[in-house]
Image: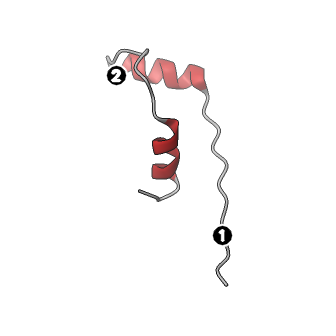
Amino acid sequence: MSKRERVAIFVDGSNMYHYVKGLGLEPKVQFDYTKFGLWLAGGT
């Protein structure tokens, strides 16, 4: 029987907004939090 691991991801929206703005990107772009979470967790 395999043990399933869990991950909690907390995103600071203000820091994310200013980071994206600092990159010169449009901050109002839709952000895929699910895809980002999977990437952080090592998924696809």
Examine the rendered structure and indicate whether residue 43 appears above or below residue 36: below
Taking the view exactly as shown, the residue that stands out farthest to the bottom is 1
What residue sits right under mark 2 in the picture? 23
Image: 31 above or below 14: below
* Mark 2 residue type: Leu
Q: Position of residue 15 (x, y in %)?
A: 55, 23
Residue under pointer 1: 4
Give the mark, 1 or 2, whose residue is nearer the N terminus. 1
Do the residues under discs 1 and 2 have CB atoms within 8 angstroms? no
The disc label shown at residue 35, or none:
none
The amino acid type, in three-letter code, at marker 1 is Arg
Q: Residues within 10 Å of mark 2 (few under 14, many from 20)?
A: few
Disc 2 secondary structure class:
loop
Of the 4 image quadrants, the one containing the C terminus is bottom left
For the N terminus, give its image quadrant.
bottom right
Residue 5 horizontal side relative to residue 44, left or right: right
Q: Which dot, 1 or 2, sits closer to the camera? A: 1
Q: Secondary structure at mark 1?
A: loop
Between 23 and 34, the one nearer to me in the picture: 34
Which residue corresponds to the image point at 47% horizontal and 59% vertical from the top-left? 42
- Tell me if residue 27 comes above or below residue 31 in the rendering: above
Between 12 and 32, the one lying in front of the other is 32
Q: Residue at x 63, y 44 (%)?
A: 9
Q: Position of residue 40 (x, y in %)?
A: 50, 51
Image coordinates for residue 6, horizontal then vertical, percent: 67, 59
